[in-house]
Amino acid sequence: MTQKPDPSEIFKLRLRSARDMREFSQSDLAGRAELPPSSIAHFENGNRKPSFDTLRRLAIALEVTTDYLLGRVEDPFLSDAADPLFRDVKNLTGKDRELAKDFLEILAKRKSASED
């Protein structure tokens, strides 16, 4: 019988993974979540657990779901409806949607090129 991972262990790993994915330092994330930088270090080391409010702030700052941080889902990304990047897409004209799509493709290619 396989033992399920400890939720606290999952949280600290997911927090670090999401922070790395966004290329934020602990200080960057702390500033975005309006927390002291030492709190991020404590969460990632497993020394402290976040309150509900802090969990929500971390998820918003990282633009991931709280379910991802808690290990309930594998996909870190917000649904299109919740993601601030996509929230206003429905209000764009067809021409502006194409422009936004082209711009996002340029950014994705730039990230891919920097990883090579």
Image: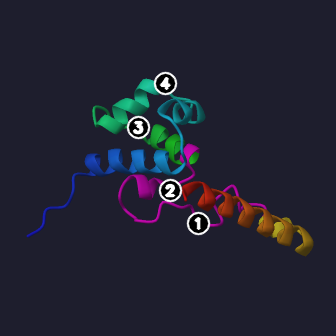
Q: Earlier in the sequence, mark 3 or mark 4?
A: 4
- Image height of 17 relative to 86, above or below: above
Q: Earlier in the sequence, mark 4 or mark 2?
A: 4
Read off the magenta span: 61-88
Q: Are marks 1 and 4 in contact (CB under 8 Å)?
A: no
Q: Residues within 10 Å of mark 2 (few under 14, many from 20)?
A: many
Q: CA separation, marks 1 and 2? A: 9 Å
Q: Are marks 3 and 4 in contact (CB under 8 Å)?
A: no
Q: Nearer the viewer, mark 3 or mark 1?
A: 1
Q: Residues within 10 Å of mark 1 (few under 14, many from 20)?
A: few
Most extreme residue toward the front is 116
Q: Earlier in the sequence, mark 3 or mark 2?
A: 3
Q: Is residue 86 magenta?
A: yes
Amino acid type at circle 3 is Ser
Amino acid type at circle 1 is Ser
Q: Are marks 1 and 2 in contact (CB under 8 Å)?
A: yes
Q: Earlier in the sequence, mark 1 or mark 4?
A: 4
Q: CA separation, marks 4 and 2? A: 21 Å
Q: In this rendering, would 94 be left or right of 56?
A: right
Q: Report which residue position mark 3 lands on.
A: 51
Q: CA separation, marks 3 and 4? A: 14 Å
Judge by depth and name the residue closer to the eye, 111 or 61.
Answer: 111
Q: Residue at x 46, y 65 (%)?
A: 75
Q: In this rendering, would 29 be left or right of 50?
A: right
Q: CA separation, marks 1 and 4? A: 28 Å
- Element type at marker 3? loop
Q: Report which residue position mark 2 lands on.
A: 65
Q: Report which residue position mark 1 lands on.
A: 79
Q: Are marks 3 and 2 in contact (CB under 8 Å)?
A: no
Amino acid type at circle 4 is Pro
Which quarter of the rendered picture does the C terminus lie within?
bottom right
